[in-house]
Every structure is written in C-alpha cells, then in structure tokens.
Amino acid sequence: MYILSRRYLPLLVGALVLAGASSLLAQAPKKPLKVGFAQTGAESTWRTANSESMKAEAAKRGIDLKFSDGQGKQENQIRAINSFITQGVDAIVLAPIVETGWDPVLRQAKRAHIPVILTDRTIKTDDESLFACFIGSDFYEEGRMAADWLAKFSGGKGSIVELQGTPGSAPANERRKSFADALAKYPGLKIIDSQSGNFERSGGKQVMEAFLKKHGKAINIVYAHNDDMALGAALAIEEAGLKPGKDITIVSIDAIREGVKAVADGRINCVVECNPLFGPKVYDTVAKLIGGGTVPKKAFNKDELFDATNAVKALPTRQY
Ligand code: AHR
C-alpha cells in the first residue's frame, strides 16, 4: 500500500490539481456576450418598437448590449461601428440608414474578425462577404402588396400622392419601386406627386399639407411608406376639412398598433405589416455565428395585411 501510494503520488497530485482547476473554471462566471447595435435613430413608432425588442431580449439573455442611436445620420452609425471594434465586441448588428457607403467600415470589422449582422435594412455592396447575414422584411413585397390591394379597392382608378421614407434608404427605394412596378398593370392608377416625409409623423403631415395646397381635390389616394407618415397625412386631411379613409383613401406600411386602430376606425384603409420585433431572431443568429455555425445569408420575416375585413379582430393581439 505504502509502495503504491509513493509510486502514484505524483500522478494523484496531478489529477487533483487538474480536477481543482477544471472545477474552478466551471465555477468562474461566463463572460457575457458583448454585442454592438448601431440603430438608425428614433424616427418612427416602428423604430421605437424595434429598439425595445433588441434591448429587452438582450437583457433577458444577459447580453452586454452596446446600443447606439444614430440620430438619422450615417456618420454617427459609422462612428458607432468603429467604437464597437475598439471595444472588442463579439458581434456587430447594423440597421443601415441608407444603402450605400458602408464598405470601408465593414472592411475594418472584417479585419477585426467581428461578424456583422444587418437587420431591418440591406446595403448595396459588391462584396457580400462584408456582412454575415441579413434579417428583416421584404420591402419590395410590401410595396407590391399595397399596390395590389389598392388596385382591387379602387377599381383600378385614382390619383395618388406618395409619401416616401428616408431618401436613399432600402425601404424607401424598394417600396417605391415595387409600388410603381405593380401600378404598371393598372393604367388608371397614377402617381401625381411623390416626396419624402422622412418616415416621420410630422414629415408626413407637412408634405400632405403641401400636396393638398398644390393638388386640392385632385388627390384620391395617399400611399405612405410607413404608418407614422400616414397618420400625419390623416391629420392634415382632417385639418383641410376632409375625411381620411373616405374622401381620400390611405394605404401604408408597418401595421403599428395605432395604424391598425386607424384602419379599424376607418381613418386609414389598409396597412401592410412590417414586423420590427426581431430581437430574438438576431441574438439566436449571433449565438450561432459565434459558435461557428452557419446561417442563411438572407432571412425574411413573414408579413401580413390589415384592412376593414380583419383589423378589428387583429387589434387586441397587436404587439407593437
Ligand atoms: O426600415 C423599416 C422602416 O423604417 C419602417 O417602415 C419605418 O417605420 C422605419 O422608420
């Protein structure tokens, strides 16, 4: 017994040291995942819901989220990404305010081996290796759904004014293009004016006031790239002594609770959904990427449409 223990003593000690070290390691608190999120700003109700979803889900998962509000400026978002790189985050999430001009800063992130997840909006680049993946809605499809709904509702006739989103942004570009593409099938539907209200309620109201001054009763339809601008336009229409939803048809995109309520109340005629609650999906993707897994390059949310036929029923369960 004595001989055995002397012979095996060094081994026994080694094993004990290893076991001790590994149990210490197991007890050591895991470092929380550090994620940088460069948000566009706070231009709309949709955006606020999107930021909330990202923040609440990070808190739930114990993720150390570095949140940056770009205040509607690309240069602020670029500055935020540079600072995330310096802070050594595990992943960067970017909701790009505009489509172009991202390559240099994304190259820096790539050099630092930090995966970049684009959410909500896409970018235009010749080098798709600069981002790991995209998660968001299909803006082109949303514009098409709005146009096809309108064609049926209006019987294919009417003069439309368009309230565009932020100039140069993917949703403004794609919702504009798909709506125009779809209208080509309906020659009786014409866009008589189109201007940006910057996705803001106040912007929608101001532009609609100008449209009403310029075109007066010639306007039958408003196509707004988001609900906030549609709600602003509805106010402008009311202030001009007309009834939104009756004298002037309104169709818009987002389906925020207030938008669906306006449809239920008959002030807006149709809203196409663009769901902003993708915090869980984004962090699942971050976890997969960091764990060395593969994810689809582009993942689109499934969106619905609400009009007089289903808005009242949908209202109680609207989450944003
Ligand atoms: O990119 C999504 C768009 O941006 C939403 O439709 C709009 O409300 C937001 O500000």
Image (tube, rainbow, N blue to C red):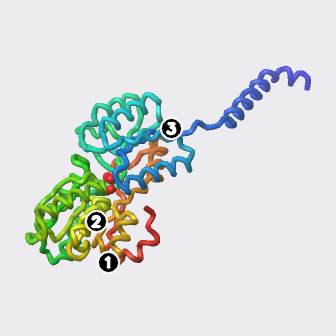
Q: Say the numbered circle drawn on residue 275.
A: none
Which residue sits at x=49%, y=48%? 55
Secondary element under disc 3, as helix, strand or loop, is strand
Number of numbered tags placed on the structure image: 3
In the rendered image, the quadrant that contains the N terminus is top right
Tag on residue 34? 3
Q: Residue at x 29, y 71 (%)?
A: 268
User: Hey, which quadrant is residue 232 in on the image?
Assistant: bottom left
Between label 1 and label 2, give the one nearer the viewer.
2
Residue 28, compared with residue 276, is above or below; it is above
Percent across and percent down for residue 180 are 15, 61
Q: Residues within 10 Å of mark 1 (few under 14, many from 20)?
A: some
Farthest residue toward the left? 187
Which tag, 3 or 1, sits closer to the chain's start?
A: 3
Image region (quadrant) for ligand 1: bottom left
Q: Earlier in the sequence, mark 1 or mark 2?
A: 2
Q: Position of residue 260 (x, y in %)?
A: 36, 69
Q: Which residue is mark 2?
A: 235
Q: Tell me the distance, in whole angstroms, between the alpha carbons under discs 2 and 3.
A: 43 Å
Pick whichever, 172 or 107, lies toward us.
172
- Residue 245 placement, left or right of 219: right
- The residue at which mark 1 appears reads as 308
Q: Which residue is drawn at the image coordinates 46% and 70% (left, top)?
A: 317
Identify residue type, mark 2: Leu
In the drawing, does residue 196 fall left or right of residue 116?
A: left
SS assignment at label 2: helix
